[in-house]
Image: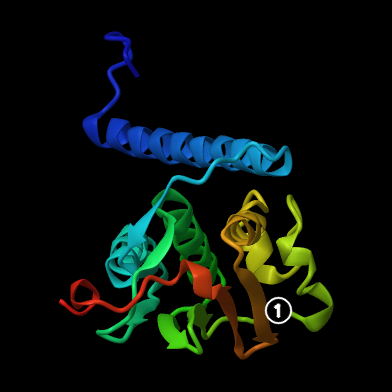
Amino acid sequence: MSRTDMHIQTETMREYGALILESGRHLLGLISGILDLSRIEAGRYELHEESIDLEFLAQSAVSQCRPMAEEAKVTIEIDAPSDLPHLWAEMRAMRQILFNLLSNAIKFTPEDGKVTVTFQYLDGHIVTCVRDTGIGIDEKDQELVFQAFQQVDNTLSREHPGSGLGLPLVKHLAELHGAVVTLDSQLGKGSCFTVTFPKDRVMALTEDNLS
């Protein structure tokens, strides 16, 4: 594309550039995922924690995923109480958890479907759920989705292949925070991935939380 003798039309160059950018981002994400998993499994991933406003974090993650959702014709919503306490966690890890769950939900939700991010404060725990109206996961395959480089064999998986690292990273990053990841899914009825954070990571309710 940089050669002056190629005489490529501007529109063609724009299309080529977009493809190269998309491929580069995909490769960068794959490499980052592999490196993160390697550090976690080797016990060398260090958390850099801070107080996190989860609603703000969710809005940021949803904004990042919105172009993907619009292309797929899928609606995204956030449901969070105004008095939700802050969470003591690593921002980068939390962004990765939410982004991976959202992008996975969008990927496997047909047109006119819906993805909802829900936050609840229950019995001292913060519970995060990403629910979709997608194709769902067979019970026999539900453990498989948390294994690195594994993907459920179905039509949408073949149409939208991925690295198989997104959900394993969610599980490992959540467990670094002492959180538990669970999956509730039925074929044809959608899925709900839930991350439950322990009480010792929930910040006390203060005026700052409520403002």
Q: Which residue is mark 1?
A: 137
Q: Secondary structure at mark 1?
A: loop
- The amino acid on which the numbered mark 1 sits, given as a three-letter code, is Ile
Residue 112: image quadrant is bottom left
Tell me the quadrant of the picture where the N terminus can be found: top left
The residue closer to the viewer here, 200 or 19, is 200
Task: Note whether 34 is above or below 201 in the view shown.
Answer: above
Q: Residue at x 30, y 23 (%)?
A: 8
The residue closer to the viewer here, 139 or 71, is 139
Q: Position of residue 130 (x, y in %)?
A: 49, 77
Tell me the quadrant of the picture where the C terminus can be found: bottom left
Q: Residue at x 30, y 87 (%)?
A: 81
Task: Note whether 3 is above or below 31 in the view shown.
Answer: above
Instruction: Decide if residue 152 is in sight here.
Output: no
Q: Is residue 158 left or right of residue 48?
A: right
Q: Is residue 72 left or right of residue 4?
A: right
Q: Residue at x 48, y 89 (%)?
A: 122
User: What crowding class fits label 1: few (fewer than 14 Cα within 10 Å), some (14-19), or many (20 or more)?
Assistant: many
Q: Residue furthest left?
A: 211
